Structure formats: C-alpha cells, structure tokens
Amino acid sequence: MIEIFGCKGNIQNIEKILKQVENLSNKYNIILQVFNADFIYGKNHLLSAVNHAKRAFAQNTNSLNSLALELLLYMSGERQIQKAILKIGINKTTNNFAFVLISKDKNEFSEKILIDVISSLNLIRDDKVLEGNIDNLKRFGISEYELETISKDKYKDLILEKVALVDIIK
C-alpha cells in the first residue's frame, strides 16, 4: 500500500524533523520519506519513483540498502545520494512538503497514521503542493529547450523520463 500526500509548514530544525520521520517509520512499521515539494510535478512523479525503486529491489539492481534512500535517487533523477539530497531534500527554507508512505506489509494505512505524521511534524495537509508547475520543472533541472520541444500537456512526461533515466545512469 502506498499513500502520497502534501503538506505546508515551516520547519527550523531539519535534524529533529528527520529523526521524527524515522521514529514514525519505526512506530508504524512503514517507509516514510519526505521531499521538498517544490521539485515535484504531480502524484505520478512520486508513484513512478516508488515503482522504479521497488522494482530495483525486486531485481537486485538497487544502489542503496534502503528503499527510502533508493526512492530518493529516483525522485531526484540523480545517481548519487548526496546530489539527490541537495536537490529534493528538505531544508530550512522548505515550506512545501511531499510525503510518501509505503507499507512494509500488505495492511492498509489508517487515517490515524496520516494524522499522527502530520500533527507530529506540525504541518498542515495541502495536496495542492504536489500539483507542480513550470517553475518546479525548471528547479528540477528541466531546461527551457526541453520545455519548448513539447506541448504543456506533456510536461509530466519530462519528469517521468528523468525518473526512468536513473535506471540507465546507475
């Protein structure tokens, strides 16, 4: 089971937040990953990255020993974890957050888990931060030239292509 949602808020202590994310992951036996939503272009971006990361583990082609970290590579379209963190990791200026929750077993998530995650991190749920726009694409590294080569209704395909390319550049 996969749950994707967005939030807004202001975080000052990144280490504390990342520790809380780790604690919530352990508490609920889930994989919980948070990204800077200003680099996300729709829920399909997140779902594609999850599917690629899971497939990498299933086929033993994963670069990292953690699905959460492998997911970070695919989300960012980067091969190196340091670059991935710098690109889409949260920082003190992050106000828009994208979350991915992945069940380690086949159980469904309860609303209680989502509420606990959001309230523990003092955030407000807002899935609109996941919608993305042309600025998100440019921040992600999509060039003006790439944007000019396709129609606006195909912009999502540029991000999905970057996610898929991680398999090749690994």
Image: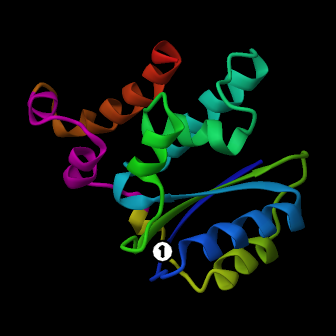
Residue 88 placement, left or right of 4: left
Membership of 131 in magenta stretch: yes
| Residue 129 picture location, percent across and down | 40, 66
Q: Is residue 44 visible?
A: no
| Residue 58 picture location, percent across and down | 78, 21
Q: Which of 102 and 16 is in front in this view?
A: 16
| Residue 36 picture location, percent across and down | 44, 60
Q: Nearer the viewer, residue 151 or 56?
A: 56
Residue at 48% over, 23% down: 166
Residue 54 placement, left or right of 170: right
Q: Can residue 85 be seen in this view?
A: yes
Residue at 88% over, 68% down: 27
In the depicted structure, whether residue 68 falls above or below residue 146: below
The secondary structure that most of the magenta stretch takes on is helix
Residue at 26% over, 33% down: 154
Membership of 135 in magenta stretch: yes
In the depicted structure, whether residue 79 falls above or below residue 128: above
Alpha-carbon neighbours of circle 1 within 10 Å: few (<14), some, or many (≥20)? some
User: How many numbered dots are placed on residues in this image?
Assistant: 1
Residue 95 placement, left or right of 117: left
Say which element carries label 1. Answer: loop
Which image quadrant is residue 54 in? top right
Residue 85 placement, left or right of 30: left
In the depicted structure, whether residue 71 falls above or below residue 102: above
Q: Name the residue under label 1.
A: 126
> Which stretch is magenta?
130-148
Type of amino acid at the residue the image marks with label 1: Asp
